[in-house]
Image: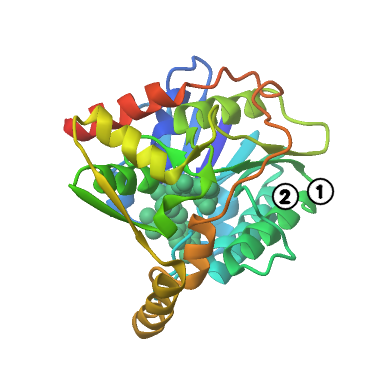
Amino acid sequence: MKIAITGANSSVGQILLGHLLKLDDVEIVAGIRSDKARASLPQSDKITPSLIDYQDPASLEASMAGCDTVIHLAGILIEFRGSNYATANVAATQAVSDAASKAGVAHILFISVIGASPDSGNAYFRSKGAGEEIVKQSGLKASVIRTPMLLGPGAAGASSLLGAASGDKAKVLGGGNYTMRPLDIDDLSQAIIHLCQNPPESTVLHELVGPEPISYRDLISRTAGKLNREIEIASIPIWTAKLGAAIGSMLKGGGISPTVIDVITLDEKVAHNADGDLGINLTPLENTLNKIITADSK
Ligand SMILES: NC(=O)c1ccc[n+]([C@@H]2O[C@H](COP(=O)([O-])OP(=O)(O)OC[C@H]3O[C@@H](n4cnc5c(N)ncnc54)[C@H](OP(=O)(O)O)[C@@H]3O)[C@@H](O)[C@H]2O)c1
């Protein structure tokens, strides 16, 4: 099985590579955008790093030659100067989809987000919804996995959680009274591998979330308990945070924006969890928290 991965240096990419390397029959083209990103990849005969440029269709197509599946991981939640939803989440997905078609790749797999919709009033969810439409209309076999907040060593969500749980007082948006079902990146990796080994006949959309619904407030308290800390949780009113974020993101040309705050504070609702369909035994949240705490202490 030969697989190309975009955004191979991302937190999901790093963990996925670790799982893929355990397979016997796998060749991986790890797509990255810089030498710094290349240096972060694990060293293995099974991995061929490939410097790709999303504005250079020929380089993208060449990197995918002979691949069975392209896993498109590159994407952002937080915009910054030079990287916005239109370029990172939509144009890059179009470029990858077009290159995969031209290279004769059979299957494209796209990581999206719970809440994605091309009609969403939220610019991030709209951009991920547009990405989903692009891969669905690519003419290739297409798998979309919508995920919630992801937890694993190095993931942004894990760093924020550990940061919040490590002090005496956590100031959290809306008191953290929104519910999520965090997903272990090891479980997402298993789902991705399952789909690479069993691509769909045409297109498929899976919503894959973690085993336990929990408010962010309780998630912080539980993590703090594991760190043997007593923590006070205070509330930042969401409207105040959005006002500050609107001004800050306008001045900086990126960063935490009202759009990001709406994403973070969404109550996640999923009608059907795809764990069974994808052959996943979900990792208990308790074990996921132990993993990120252990990795952080090294
Ligand atoms: N983390 C989560 O909780 C979460 C939740 C739902 C969905 N997802 C999705 O899962 C995927 C992986 O997430 P992650 O958290 O592992 O990502 P990450 O660690 O933040 O890495 C982002 C990746 O996207 C690349 N990238 C950034 N701007 C880009 C641009 N303008 N054009 C092309 N590539 C660009 C980065 O490359 P450089 O290093 O070169 O900048 C990097 O490889 C993303 O598609 C994300 O939307 C993540």
The residue lying at 35 percent from left, 85 percent from top is 251
Label 1 belongs to which residue? 139
Residue 238: x and y in percent read 45, 67
The residue lying at 62 percent from left, 60 percent from top is 125
Residue 197: x and y in percent read 65, 23
20 left or right of 60 in image: left
Q: Which mark is residue 63?
A: none
Point out the frontmost of discs 2 and 1. 1
**Image quarter hosting the N terminus:** top right
Label 2 belongs to which residue? 101
Residue 123: x and y in percent read 60, 69
Classify 190 as above or below 207. Answer: above
Q: Amino acid at mark 1?
A: Gly
Q: Residues within 10 Å of mark 2 (few under 14, many from 20)?
A: some
Classify 231 as above or below 226. Answer: below
The residue lying at 61 percent from left, 48 percent from top is 112
Residue 272: x and y in percent read 73, 33
